Amino acid sequence: MKKLIHKLVKAGRQNLNKQIIAVEEEENKDGDDARKLKLTLVKFFKENPEPNDEAIHNFAKELKLDPSELETAIYKLLGSLVNLKKGDMPDDKFDAEQLKMGVKVERKEHTDDPDIAKAISKAHLDEIPDYYTRLLKMEKEAGVKE
């Protein structure tokens, strides 16, 4: 009897593990879909810096999305850009040279807006204080020119 119970418990755990894995895979799929939509939106706005409502609705049709669904994704993306978590930290919490390098890099790579570039830089520097020195070193080693 104990062996049977042990087998049932083990089978139940395996089944539960399969269910957990399936849920995680589905969550990752949803995350991948959200990331793909975010990247698609970024590309769209680079190509259409000031789209009107009609352009957004046409774009939603191209993506086979309801316009309100696309608008919600746009608002989320905008909110994430405006509310960069480290952007409000005082400049003097970061190495001045690293911050200067960071703003230059982020303006070149991601945005023309110096405030957003600074917020992105602060986020990187908060995690790795010499982030831009390391980045420059890696680029030099890879033979990337400015």
Image (cartoon, rainbow, N blue to C red):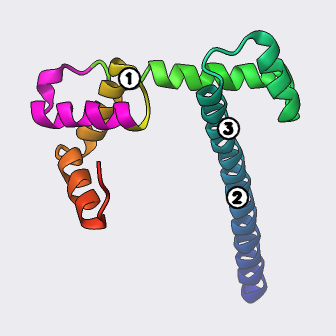
Q: Quadrant of residue 10?
A: bottom right
The residue beneath circle 2 is 25
Cα distance between the residues tagged 1 and 3: 20 Å
User: Outermost residue toward the front?
Assistant: 145
Cα distance between the residues tagged 1 and 2: 33 Å
Q: Could you tell me the amino acid type at mark 2?
A: Glu
The residue beneath circle 3 is 40
Q: Nearer the viewer, residue 124 or 117?
A: 117
Q: Which segment is the magenta one? A: 89-108
Q: Could you tell me the amino acid type at mark 1?
A: Ile
Question: Percent from the top left, x then y, of residue 139?
Answer: 28, 58
Magenta stretch holds residue 112: no
User: Residue, x 80% and y 27% (percent of image)?
Assistant: 59
- Crowding around mark 2 (Cα neighbors within 10 Å: few <14, some 14 to 19, many 20+) is few
Give the secondary structure at mark 3: helix
Q: Is residue 86 above or below residue 18?
A: above
